[in-house]
Amino acid sequence: MNVEKRIIATWALIGLTTMAMLWSGVAARVMAAESHGILEDFHAKETDGFPVNWKNENGRNEARAREAYKVQAEQDRGFLAVRNADQRIKNKKIEWDPKANPVLTWRWRLHKAPAGADPIAVIYVALDTDLLFIPVFTKYIWSGTKPEGAVTEGGMFSGSEIVVQSGLTATEWVEERVNVYEDFKRIHKHEPAEKAWGISLFAGPGVDVDFGPIAVSAQ
């Protein structure tokens, strides 16, 4: 092989190596995107500040729900400010594969809660529905009376509760991380649906609390 051919071959090898590295980087980013996703970042809001795609759980007191739940921002980070709600809002459009991405993370911040408040705030995670298409959910709660780690089994119309935060003292942002897939199997004794049904949020009477972005990941 003459010098010219060797140079061409060398540059061709360099080009192929560079392309392989680029494709490897793209593949890594795709895999990362598939293994982690933001379910709600609390940036999109309606004209009155109510979060887009959310609705009052029971269809009553809609005006109160829209007054209690407001999307706000802090250092360009969106969050949901909840003030004296005493009712739940839901988003059925939040869905993901809980087996592939079992870890749910979020943050919340308590400003105030009355003595004896229980629960203070709740994230309801529904990974399935029953035969009547009623959501089968697990409640991750901030309790004013029960210790962290306490589990209360639910009934036909109430989900099982897991206390992930406890206390009435105002705090800065608190990060939570739970494995909703494993919790669901342990509590409900069967596999969830292939796609999660949705998420609901609740804050009690007299409670001022903020919910930050909600995300899922593989681990």
Image (cartoon, grey):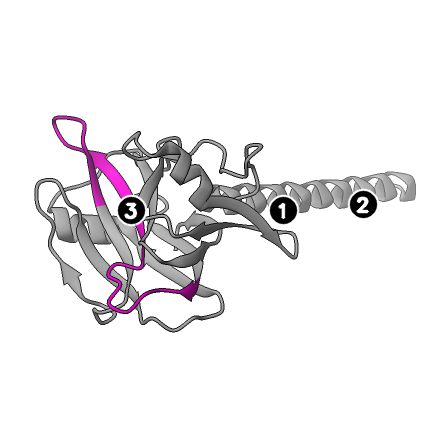
Left or right for 15, reference 42: right
Question: Which image quarter: residue 107?
Answer: bottom left
Residue range in magenta is 110-137
- In front here: 111 or 26? 111
- The image position of residue 50, as x and y in percent, is 49, 38
Residue at 78% x, 39% y is 12
Give neighbour class at mark 3: few <14, some 14-19, many 20+ (Cα, 10 Å). Answer: many
**Which one is earlier in the sequence, the residue at label 2 or at label 3?**
2
Describe the element under mark 3 as helix, strand or loop. strand
- The image position of residue 203, as x and y in percent, is 34, 52
Type of amino acid under label 3: Tyr
Q: Report whether residue 38 is seen.
A: no
Give neighbour class at mark 1: few <14, some 14-19, many 20+ (Cα, 10 Å). Answer: few
Task: Check residue 25 in the rendering and tell me which mark sits there, or answer none.
Answer: 1
Which image quarter is the C terminus in?
bottom left
**Which one is earlier in the sequence, the residue at label 1 or at label 2?**
2
- The image position of residue 80, as x and y in percent, is 49, 49
Residue at 57% x, 42% y is 43
Residue designated by label 2: 10
Give neighbour class at mark 2: few <14, some 14-19, many 20+ (Cα, 10 Å). Answer: few
- In front here: 183 or 33? 183
Question: Which image quarter: residue 65?
Answer: top left
Contact flag, marks 1 and 2 (Cβ < 8 Å): no
Describe the element under mark 1 as helix, strand or loop. helix
Type of amino acid under label 2: Thr
Residue at 22% x, 72% y is 147
